[in-house]
Image (tube, rainbow, N blue to C red):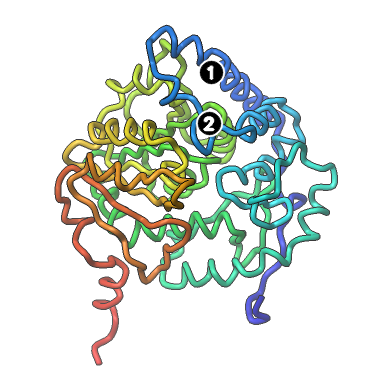
Amino acid sequence: MSQKIPARFIGPRENHPLSRGDYNLACQLCDVMVGLRNNRPGYLASRGLDPGVFLPGHVWEGDFCPANFNTVTAKNYHTLNHLRMLTYNFSGYRLLDMQSAEGQGLISEIPPNVDEVVRAHAQRATPFVEHFLRSVANLSSSLVVKAPRIMGESGWEVGGVVINYDNWATQQRINALYCSGVLDLLQERIKARGFCRILEIGAGYGNLAYALTRILGPTDYTIIDLPESLVYSTCYLNVVLPGQAHHVVVPAGQKAEAGPGLTYLANHLLDEFLPSLGQMDLAINVLSLSEMSPEQVDYYARVLGGLLGEEGVFLEQNYFKPGFHTDAKSILSQYFPYHRRLEETVAPHTGRGEVGIWANRYIGEVFNSSDILAWKQLFSSPAT
């Protein structure tokens, strides 16, 4: 790390511990997710739904999905208080030892000396400080990802912001949404309606949902995910966004009325509640469509086509490794007539995967080939 960058390492001991009330809420949410998962086979059978579409498939049908789910839903306080140590199955990066999760196996339990373990590997996280700072160099502070210091968040603190691989990756997504014009589009929807509507397929532990809710303001945010994954985002977001309305959908229940707040919908309930979801301004998927089976990608592409209507856009970032990944972009092209590949932007967004923006009709605000930030900088620079 450059000596010019004033930084100090933030580990679990600098985090705010879960309150008794937040812990009890997380336990209740764990129980709901266990119920959704346990009752899923019977639910699918009773409605004649294809298990190949709604059960964990392709990359996600291995052992790590249920194993990590069982670890979280055991409801151990120490585990939930350090939930970020288990989110590597979404980001591919382990905060516990600050390294790639690839080939590392499962973390079966959070060690009692977790703070000591994390600090022993702090230097591994130093490259992300400069990566992150380059990503935000041209942005206003309102667009900078500021992760809450709870549930084990760890990394190098610079100017009050905790930096690690996960937060750098989240910043890349914010940069893509901003530079492509999508954030400006959402702000216009907020002015017109009072709130914008976002649907995210596979939200991981909720990092992007948290960042967007804080950046945009009034947002009706729906997360669709496997119960095995939804347990993370429900526990995390209920704790870090206490002022928001939160609603977990259950079979034969009701979806919350449209308006600011967060809705959590298990993927196998999507058909049941699809008529009540309404039109979305933005749909998001990051790095999971290509990990699904072709049948699953086809299902989501068809569903999104209807949910986005004539006014919504779909932003996804996925990459394709032949023989391992599903070629999600080729499937999406069968459903969406308009597509834009987002080239590198002034505020860097490149990472794993290529950002694509899709829609049912040509929407000039996002399909014009300009980089919004570059355009604004051009006209804010003094004349030479």
Quarter-of-image position of residue 239? top right
Q: Position of residue 343 (x, y in %)?
A: 32, 65
Q: Is residue 94 visible?
A: yes
**Quadrant including the N terminus:** bottom right
Q: Is residue 21 visible?
A: no
Q: Earlier in the sequence, mark 2 or mark 1?
A: 1
Q: Position of residue 252 (x, y in %)?
A: 41, 10
- Of all residues, the one furthest to the top in this rendering is 46
Q: Which residue is mark 1?
A: 36
**Which residue is drawn at the image coordinates 25% and 92% (left, top)?**
384
Dot 2 alpha-carbon crowd within 10 angstroms: few under 14, some 14 to 19, many 20 or more: many
Kindly state the secondary structure of the residue where label 2 is placed. Answer: helix
Dot 1 alpha-carbon crowd within 10 angstroms: few under 14, some 14 to 19, many 20 or more: many
Q: Position of residue 234 (x, y in %)?
A: 54, 32
**Tag 2 near tag 1, CB within 8 Å:** yes
Instruction: Kindly identify which numbered label has been placed on residue 287.
Output: none
**Tag count:** 2
192 above or below 320?
A: above
Identity, as a three-letter code, of the amino acid under mark 2: Leu
Q: Tell me the distance, in whole angstroms, between the alpha carbons under discs 2 and 1.
A: 10 Å
Q: Nearer the viewer, residue 202 or 106?
A: 106
Kindly state the secondary structure of the residue where label 1 is placed. Answer: helix
Q: Nearer the viewer, residue 249 or 98?
A: 98
Q: Which residue is mark 2?
A: 230
**Which residue is drawn at the image coordinates 34% and 59% (left, top)?**
178
Identity, as a three-letter code, of the amino acid under mark 1: Leu
Q: Position of residue 326 (x, y in %)?
A: 41, 43
- Of all residues, the one furthest to the bottom in this rendering is 384
